[in-house]
């Protein structure tokens, strides 16, 4: 156990290195210097000044006006991005204060070229309201980590009543993080669905990671999620390594400060396919930082590892930070692999559950019996207060915890 714990400590440090804080340089292009744009503008679906070209022009002009600007999109319209506005982004990097009211519109990439939808620069403030952001893709081959398939935020980003779907990040011989959103700043998500976003990585003989299918909240960043759904997202790593490789957080990855209220984190997957792969946190993986979750569900998520020396930790939640769950249901999650620990929750640091339920989760070992169908404690401390842990397989808690 000591050797395995030491290995996991190294893994956590490397995860923090791979997805930790880093400077982001905004590349701004397409603005018309010296041109003022109205504080409020409507971009039509088609025609002169409309469509994707009109949206790009409106954002570029907004970057050069003082104060807050508002852009209204045509109800139900799809603004199709077929090319980059600047390197890596389908829309101009937002550098000022901007609100975009979508009225049910979609902004979607449709191109053989890979680029994200939008980036928010340090010091900037973007609000997206009633918008679908879809199809963004950032890829990296043998180089820097790919971040933020749909949105990369290094300023302040607020998303309201929207959908972030079918975006992705992909690394070939490289790591990838934040299929839907990668956050380096302050992110607020309200009444929003994050669905079918992916982080994927492939490699051999190196350390690489796919982290945060829906959201990656990096070191020093803050994310708040209220009244939302994080569903059917995935982090998938494929290959082999003499050391290890990682698939972490099918739904949400955290190394900063994360607050989740009245939110469903359901049906997400972390999959490590190959020798020495480590799959952790099908729903949420916490590499570090502080996490508070209340009145929420973590259900039907899976951490799956296959291959010699592979391990799966935390079908629902993998915790290596300081995490508190209140009035939260952790149910129907599965950890599967040669080593399978924590069908519901895996703890390596500090975990507190208050008035919560950990029920009907499974740790399914393929080379040895699974451990901690409900909760597996590898290190740190678990506190249970008025919490039910029952009907998990093959056991509820491993090792024993007071109240379990």
Image (cartoon, grey):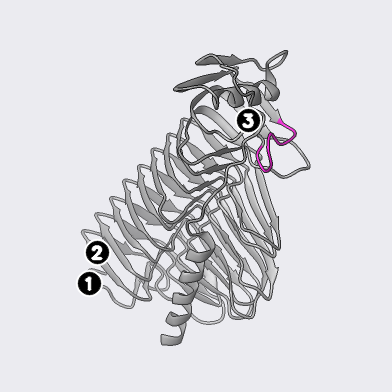
Q: What residue is pinned by disc 1?
A: 402
Question: Looking at the image, which residue sits at the far front?
Answer: 34
- Tag of residue 59: none
Circle 1: element type: loop
Which is in the foreground here, disc 3 or disc 1?
A: 3
Question: Looking at the image, which residue sits at the far right?
Answer: 112
Q: Is residue 39 left or right of residue 134?
A: left
Q: Could you classify mark 2 by the number of other residues whose Cα lies within 10 Å: few (under 14), some (14-19), or many (20 or more)? A: some
Which of marks 3 and 2 precedes in the sequence?
3
Q: Nearer the viewer, residue 364 or 399?
A: 399
Percent x, y of residue 188: 41, 39
- Tag of residue 107: 3
- Rounded to the nearest angstrom, the CA distance separating label 3 from label 1 is 50 Å
Residue 197 sits above or below residue 375 on the image: above
Q: Could you classify mark 3 by the number of other residues whose Cα lies within 10 Å: few (under 14), some (14-19), or many (20 or more)? A: many
Percent x, y of residue 271: 59, 63
Q: Are marks 1 and 2 in contact (CB under 8 Å)?
A: yes
- Rounded to the nearest angstrom, the CA distance separating label 2 from label 3 is 44 Å
Q: Which residues are drawn in magenta?
A: 81-89
Pick the quarter of the image with the N terminus: bottom left
Quadrant of res 388: bottom left
Residue 248 visible here? no
Q: What residue is pinned by disc 2?
A: 384
Which of marks 2 and 1 precedes in the sequence?
2
Percent x, y of residue 154: 49, 44
Magenta region includes residue 298: no
- Rounded to the nearest angstrom, the CA distance separating label 1 from label 2 is 7 Å
């Amino acid at each position: 156990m000591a050797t395995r714990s030491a290995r996991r400590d190294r893994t956590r440090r490397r995860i923090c290195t791979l997805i930790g804080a880093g400077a982001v340089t905004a590349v701004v292009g397409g603005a018309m210097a010296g041109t003022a744009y109205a504080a409020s503008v409507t971009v039509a679906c088609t025609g002169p000044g409309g469509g994707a070209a009109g949206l790009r022009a409106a954002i570029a002009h907004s970057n050069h006006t003082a104060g807050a600007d508002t852009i209204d999109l045509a109800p139900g319209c799809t603004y199709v991005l077929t090319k980059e506005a600047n390197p890596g982004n389908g829309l101009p990097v937002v550098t000022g204060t901007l609100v975009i009211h979508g009225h049910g519109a979609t902004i979607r990439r449709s191109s053989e070229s890979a680029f994200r939808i939008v980036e928010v620069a340090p010091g900037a403030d973007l609000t997206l309201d009633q918008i679908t952001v879809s199809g963004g893709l950032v890829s990296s081959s043998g180089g820097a980590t790919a971040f933020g398939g749909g949105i990369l935020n290094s300023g302040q980003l607020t998303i309201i009543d929207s959908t972030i779907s079918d975006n992705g990040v992909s690394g070939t011989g490289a790591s990838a993080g934040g299929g839907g959103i990668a956050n380096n700043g302050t992110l607020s998500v309200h009444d929003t669905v994050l669905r079918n976003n992916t982080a994927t990585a492939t490699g051999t003989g190196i350390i690489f990671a796919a982290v945060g299918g829906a959201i990656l909240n990096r070191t020093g960043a803050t994310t708040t999620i209220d009244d939302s759904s994080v569903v059917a997202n995935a982090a998938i790593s494929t290959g082999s390594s003499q050391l290890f490789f990682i698939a972490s957080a099918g739904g949400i990855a955290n190394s900063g400060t994360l607050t989740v209220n009245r939110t469903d984190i359901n049906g997400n997957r972390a999959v490590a396919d190959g020798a020495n792969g480590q799959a952790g946190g099908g729903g949420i993986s916490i590499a570090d930082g502080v996490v508070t979750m209340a009145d929420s569900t973590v259900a039907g998520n899976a951490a799956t590892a296959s291959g010699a020396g592979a391990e799966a930790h935390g079908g629902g939640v993998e915790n290596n930070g300081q995490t508190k769950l209140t009035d939260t249901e952790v149910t129907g999650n599965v950890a599967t692999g040669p080593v399978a620990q924590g069908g519901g929750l895996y703890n390596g640091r500090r975990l507190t559950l208050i008035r919560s339920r950990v029920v009907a989760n499974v740790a399914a070992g393929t080379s040895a019996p699974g451990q901690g169908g409900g909760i597996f404690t590898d290190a740190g401390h678990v506190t249970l207060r008025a919490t039910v842990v029952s009907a998990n397989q093959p056991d509820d808690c491993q090792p024993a915890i007071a109240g379990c």
